Every structure is written in structure tokens, then in C-alpha cells.
């Protein structure tokens, strides 16, 4: 059956459809005629175009959101939760359909796409419990006959700007919480894989969300900038690369908005000599090459203590030889990169590594690929003895390139991790509880795994890094999410009691 929410993939060049925005509960074309190509990265072709909103388009969408926000703010908590429960059921029942969209536009393999959806659904389930998470507090008789209580109220219209690498999960980190808390949303997803956002918005409409409460506006910098300065947008949630995260934080803050801007990463995994080396090798391969390394929580650097480094490299290499890269619908382990330009950029680091004196142990350019020869392929790549002065170590490569940096012990490893400008995720592999405890205390990183390679916190904790991986302090989802999308109001009340009258111009004190 044809799904009218998603532009049909092209079968010929003349046949390219254009994906609309989703505004006011229906597809919407806006006034801008600019578009961008959306690739099928496993075939290396443009499969559809996506509209790029003008400032006027964004303004129109914000106005629709603003108009819808009043009614939604007044909807009971029970009604908001009912929509979330229904949405959860729809997504769960049709997750294969959404996973196919993710594989087709992002390229990630089907099992990984389903994993992304499952992690996003965790946040929907959290939002089903909004009643508990938006409760206020009440203190009776703070002074004689006086009570103080606090309420959590929605902000109004909030903007969400998301990256290409999790086209479903990252929007799901934010909009269920924002909406369950009573806000209206304008979501600007990545223009590289935009269809998942329309699918999710249509599912929210089907779940009973009033029109205009969740809007999807596609676009590039023009659309983002329009959201950052719009006076009716009260808060911005951003996820993407560090330079853009910093720009978003500075610009939106300067326009008086609440901002959480999650940036890029370079995640280290420290392997101590007493670690279970099979467990560590499995973890390095899974976290290094899952989703072709296009994860903000990917392990991109293994810090291997000299005593076990050779053995660890051998075991990682053995495992890499078993991986199949190719079309994500064919049961492969790893799919293509997002664009041809990005694939070439990532592959370029392999030459940089050789020039900088590192050892290329496995060169992913030599791999065989189970898919169309025009796909944006690069196989898993392992580079040993990477100097920390090399851009291979310093840059966020965001591809299937795993670097090994050799260290002489715990202190050396910790020094390198804490010297990184990023602080998103890290992991330690050891069987020494004392070392692990020291690590969790001393490491300057927001999310830490102990014998766990991708420590993405569950929905009832919060997700976010330190340093250049998060600007603005508030993390995503969990209690931080509900705090971010609500404003607290404290009320001090006294009901008439004839015994408490009279004039007193002094600062109020408790009696
Ligand atoms: P990106 O920064 O290029 O784009 C993110 C969003 O910003 C997109 O919606 C894009 O349209 C918009 N954008 C891009 N350039 C802009 C500009 N000049 N002005 C205004 N808006 C602009 O990121 P990406 O390539 O889509 O995603 C990958 C990056 O996201 C990686 O750095 C990755 O680490 C990061 N990421 C971080 C997390 C996290 O939780 N910290 C999670 C996922 C991805």
C-alpha cells in the first residue's frame, strides 16, 4: 500500500518525488522552492528530494504551533498520556515499516534500525509516566497559616534540531517529553534522512495528537536560524556536531532561549591488563563498527595498555575478518556511509594515518561489499599505534575507523581521556573493582561504561556528555528532560484568617 506521508522512492531520474513538511497535522509544501537530495546510500543514487524551508515557512509553522499550544497546555495529563500510550502501540506494531525507512535513507542495517527504534520507544514509555515526572511539591505551614507549593508548567513552543545518524531515536529523545509536558513542537530533522520524522509525526496524529502540536519543518541553515531567533520559540534542543552545537547554544541563548545543545564525541575505551580480552575485543568491534561508526557513542579509540596491546589487536582483527559490509536489508553487519562525500572524507584518514606513522592493520577500502557497486561503502578499518598528535586521533572521524593508542598504564590512559576536548562517553575494561571505581570518579566524561562499551543511559536516567559534547547543561530525557521542557512556578498562599492581619513593612519572616 502506498504511504502518502513519505515521498515514493524514485525508480527513474525523471520520477523524483519531493518530501513535504508536516505542519498542522498534514503534509505541507510551504512557499520555498529550494530542495536537497536524499540519497539511498546503499545504491549511491538520489531517491527523493526534500523541501528546504524558508524563514517565512518556519514562521508559519511556529505560528501554527503557537496557536495549538494553548489548547494542548489545557489538555489533562490523562489525555496527554493517552496519546503517548497510543503512539507507543502504533510505533511498536509498525516498527518494521519505520526500520525500512531508516535503512533506505541512512543505510544502517535492519537489526540496528530496529535497535534504534527500541531505544527511542523507551523515551515514549517514560513520557507515558509524565504525571509522576511533572508533579510539583507542597509544603504546608511554612509560616503560620502559610503554604508554599510549586507547579511545573509547559514553556509553549519548543524547537528540536536533530542529526542524520539517528533519524528516529534522537527526535524521540525530545518530542515525547516536550509534548507530554504540554508543549507544542517544531522539529527540524536532518535533511539527509528526513522521512522518518514525517512518519513519526503522522503516527502521533493517528494516536490522537491535536493538529499543530507536533510539526516537522525540513531545511538547512536558513530554517535552523529562523528557529533560533523566533520570539515565540522558547527553547531549543539540538543534537549534532560540536561546531554547530556551539553556534546553536550561543545564538539561541543570545535570543533569550533555554538551550540544550549536544555535540560531537571522540570516545575512548581503556583496556587494562587484567581485563577479559575476549570481552574487550567483542566490545571494541561492536562499538567501533556498529552503524558504520556513525554513532556519537561509538568507540573510536582503544587505549590498550602495552602489556596486552598486541594480543588485543590480534583478537580485534580476528573478529573484524568475520564482519560483512553491504546492503542493510541483506542481513549484513554494517551498512554504507551516509553520503559519497562523507565516505571519501573518512577513507582519507587512512592515508593520513600512514603519513603520520601509524600502522594500518586493516584497510576498509580493500573490503568486499554485498551490495550495489555504487553504494557509499567503506569496510571496517583498524589503525594501530596512532600518535595522539595525528588528526586521526584528534578529529571525530564518524566512520568505521578504529584507532589503537598504546598506553603504559591506567594513569597514562586517564591523562589522554581527560585531555580530550570531548567528554561524551567512555569505557573501562578491567576485572579490578578498585580501578573501575577510581575511573568512574576521576574521568572527565558524562557517560561511563564499566565493562560496557556503549553506555547510553536508559530513559529514566538522562543522556548527555561533558565539555565540548554538551553546551547548556541540561541533558536529554529522564528528569533533565522534564525539567528542560517545563518551568517551575512557586506559590506562597495564605487563606484569610482574621488573626493574621495588620501592617508590617519589614521583609516577610516566618512566624
Ligand atoms: P550536523 O551538526 O552537521 O547537523 C545537525 C543538524 O544541524 C542538522 O539538522 C543540520 O541540518 C543542522 N545544521 C548543519 N549545519 C548547520 C549550520 N551551519 N547552521 C545551522 N544548522 C546547521 O551533524 P550531523 O552530521 O547531522 O550528525 C553527526 C554529528 O552529530 C556528529 O558530530 C555526532 O557526534 C553528533 N551527535 C551527537 C550526539 C550526542 O548525543 N552528543 C548524538 C548523535 C549525533
Image (cartoon, rainbow, N blue to C red):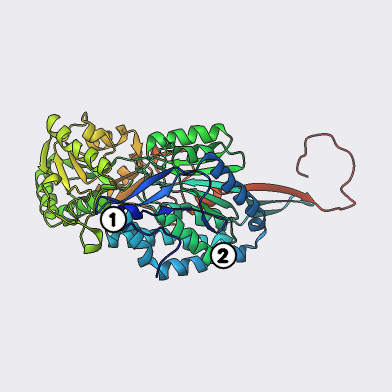
Q: Earlier in the sequence, mark 1 or mark 2?
A: 2
Front-lying residue, 399 or 64: 64
- Residue 337: x %, y % from top left: 26, 48
Q: Is residue 91 left or right of residue 299?
A: right
- The disc placed on residue 135 is none
Front-lying residue, 144 or 13: 13
Quadrant placement of the C terminus: top right
Q: Tag 1's secondary structure?
A: loop
Residue 436 appears anywhere in the view:
yes
Front-lying residue, 409 or 18: 18
- Residue 378: x %, y % from top left: 19, 47
Answer whether labels 1 and 2 touch (C-beta < 8 Å): no
Neighbours of disc 2 within 10 Å: few (<14), some (14-19), many (20+) = many
- Residue 462: x %, y % from top left: 44, 51
Quadrant placement of the N terminus: bottom left
Residue at mark 1 = 108
Neighbours of disc 1 within 10 Å: few (<14), some (14-19), many (20+) = many
Q: Residue at x 39, y 54 (%)?
A: 17
- Residue 274: x %, y % from top left: 17, 49
Q: Tag 2's secondary structure?
A: helix
Q: Is residue 455 left or right of residue 290?
A: right
Q: Residue at x 62, y 62 (%)?
A: 77
Considering only vertical position in the picture, is 205 above or below 194? Answer: below
Ligand 1: does it lie within 8 Å of the C-beta at label 1? no
Image quadrant, ligand 1: top left
Q: Residue at x 27, y 35 (%)?
A: 395
Residue at mark 2 = 81
Gap between marks 1 and 2 measured at Cα = 31 Å
Considering only vertical position in the picture, is 459 above or below 402? Answer: below
Amino acid at each position: 500500500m502506498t504511504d502518502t506521508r513519505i515521498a515514493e522512492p524514485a525508480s527513474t531520474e525523471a520520477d523524483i518525488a519531493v518530501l513535504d513538511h508536516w505542519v498542522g497535522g498534514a503534509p505541507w509544501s510551504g512557499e520555498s522552492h529550494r530542495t536537497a537530495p536524499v540519497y539511498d546510500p546503499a545504491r549511491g543514487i538520489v531517491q527523493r528530494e526534500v523541501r528546504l524551508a524558508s524563514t517565512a515557512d518556519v514562521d508559519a509553522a511556529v505560528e501554527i504551533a503557537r496557536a495549538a499550544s494553548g489548547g494542548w497546555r489545557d489538555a489533562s495529563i490523562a489525555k496527554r498520556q493517552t496519546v503517548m500510550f497510543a503512539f507507543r502501540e502504533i510505533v511498536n506494531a509498525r516498527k518494521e515499516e519505520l526500520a525500512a525507512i531508516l535503512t533506505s535513507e541512512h543505510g544502517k542495517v535492519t537489526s540496528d534500525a530496529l535497535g534504534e527504534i527500541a531505544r527511542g520507544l523507551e523515551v515514549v514509555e517514560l513520557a507515558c509516566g509524565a504525571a509522576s515526572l511533572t508533579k510539583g511539591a507542597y509544603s504546608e505551614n511554612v509560616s503560620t497559616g502559610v503554604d508554599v507549593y510549586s507547579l511545573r508548567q509547559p514553556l509553549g513552543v519548543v524547537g528540536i534540531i536533530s542529526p542524520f545518524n539517528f533519524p528516529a531515536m534522537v527526535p524521540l529523545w525530545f518530542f515525547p517529553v516536550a509534548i507530554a509536558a504540554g508543549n507544542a513542537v517544531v522539529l527540524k530533522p536532518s535533511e539527509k534522512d528526513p522521512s522518518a520524522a514525517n512518519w513519526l509525526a503522522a503516527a502521533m496524529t493517528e494516536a490522537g495528537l491535536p493538529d499543530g502540536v507536533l510539526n516537522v519543518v525540513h531545511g538547512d541553515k536558513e530554517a535552523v536560524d529562523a528557529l533560533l531567533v523566533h520570539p515565540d520559540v522558547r527553547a531549543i534542543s539540538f543534537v549534532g556536531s560540536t561546531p554547530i552545537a556551539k553556534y546553536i547554544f550561543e545564538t539561541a541563548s543570545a535570543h533569550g532561549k533555554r538551550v540544550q545543545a549536544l555535540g560531537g564525541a571522540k570516545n575512548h575505551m581503556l583496556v587494562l591488563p587484567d581485563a577479559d580480552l575476549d570481552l574487550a575485543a567483542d566490545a571494541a568491534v561492536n562499538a567501533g563498527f556498529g552503524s558504520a561508526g556513525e554513532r556519537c557513542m561509538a568507540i573510536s579509540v582503544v587505549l590498550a595498555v602495552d602489556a596486552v596491546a598486541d594480543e588485543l589487536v590480534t583478537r580485534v582483527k580476528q573478529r573484524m575478518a568475520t564482519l560483512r559490509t553491504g546492503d542493510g536489508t541483506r542481513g549484513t553487519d554494517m551498512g554504507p556511509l551516509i553520503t559519497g562525500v562523507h565516505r571519501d572524507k573518512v577513507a582519507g584518514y587512512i592515508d593520513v594515518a600512514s603519513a603520520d606513522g601509524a600502522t594500518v592493520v586493516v584497510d576498509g577500502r580493500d573490503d568486499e561489499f554485498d551490495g550495489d557497486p555504487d553504494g557509499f561503502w567503506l569496510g571496517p578499518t583498524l589503525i594501530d599505534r596512532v600518535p595522539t598528535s595525528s588528526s586521526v586521533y584528534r578529529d571525530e572521524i564518524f566512520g568505521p575507523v578504529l584507532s589503537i593508542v598504546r598506553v603504559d598504564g591506567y594513569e597514562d590512559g586517564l591523562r589522554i581521556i581527560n585531555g580530550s576536548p570531548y567528554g561524551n562517553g567512555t569505557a573501562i575494561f578491567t576485572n579490578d573493582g578498585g580501578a573501575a571505581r577510581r575511573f568512574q570518579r576521576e574521568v572527565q566524561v558524562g557517560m561511563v561504561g564499566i565493562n560496557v562499551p556503549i553506555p547510553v543511559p536508559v530513559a529514566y536516567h538522562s543522556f548527555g556528555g561533558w565539555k565540548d559534547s554538551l553546551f547548556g547543561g541540561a541533558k536529554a530525557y529522564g528528569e533533565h528532560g522534564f525539567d528542560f521542557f517545563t518551568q517551575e512556578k512557586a506559590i506562597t498562599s495564605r487563606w484569610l484568617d482574621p488573626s493574621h492581619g495588620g501592617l508590617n513593612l519589614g521583609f516577610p519572616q516566618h512566624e
